[in-house]
Image (cartoon, rainbow, N blue to C red):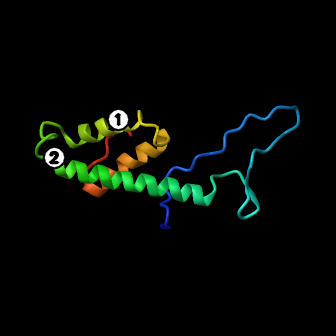
Amino acid sequence: MTTSIPANFPREELIAALTGIQPKLAVRFDAANRTYSSSTPSDELQARFDLCEDLAHQLAQKCVRNRSTKYAHMSEEKILTSFYKKLNTTGWGSKAEMQWVIRRTADLLNWLAPAAL
């Protein structure tokens, strides 16, 4: 599924440790396109976005389902903050991606995103 990736979706920078005294530039080789790039390959970025977008929709559905029962005692901000803390323990994505998921979930629900994000 190829969709337009929003500008606010996090793009991970290439982090590399290169030894030697000469200046160096870290890049990745995309064998499919036979190109070099210092950013995340577009197919990998698309896959990360699709995963995060799906996760945001799942969380939004869970919030709607449980808003009047399981989460009735919690504010919208506390619900989203709780999800954010849990997401960071899963290893499903980077911290920046999980922040984006929570902001996207808030957007889908028409809620305010937690200020801490």
Whether 5 is drawn above or below 89: the answer is below
Counting from the top left corner in percent of width and height, residue 44 is at: 58, 55
At label 1, counting other C-alpha atoms closer than 10 Å, the crowd grade (few under 14, some 14-19, many 20 or more) is few
Q: Quadrant of the C terminus?
A: top left
Q: Which mark is residue 86?
A: 1
**Which label belongs to residue 104?**
none
Residue depicted at 25% across the width and 54% down the height: 61
Look at the numbered disc 1 and give the secondary structure of its residue: helix
The spot of residue 1 in percent (x, y) is 47, 67
Left or right position of 19 against 106: right
The structure residue drawn at horizontal position 35% and vertical position 35%, both measured from the top left corner, is 86
Q: Classify 10 Å Cα crowding around label 2: few (below 14), some (14-19), many (20 and above).
A: some
Position of residue 4 in the picture relative to residue 36 (left or right): left
Please report whichever mark, 2 or 1, sits nearer to the chain's N-terminal start: 2
Q: Nearer the viewer, residue 88 or 102?
A: 88
Circle 2 SS class:
loop
Q: Is residue 4 above or below residue 63?
A: below
Q: Amino acid at mark 1?
A: Lys
Q: Give percent across and percent down for residue 111.
A: 25, 51
Q: Amino acid at mark 2?
A: Arg
User: How many marks overall?
Assistant: 2
- Residue nearest the observer in this picture, 66 or 112: 66
Residue wearing tag 2: 67
Residue appearing at x 38%, y 56% in the figure: 54
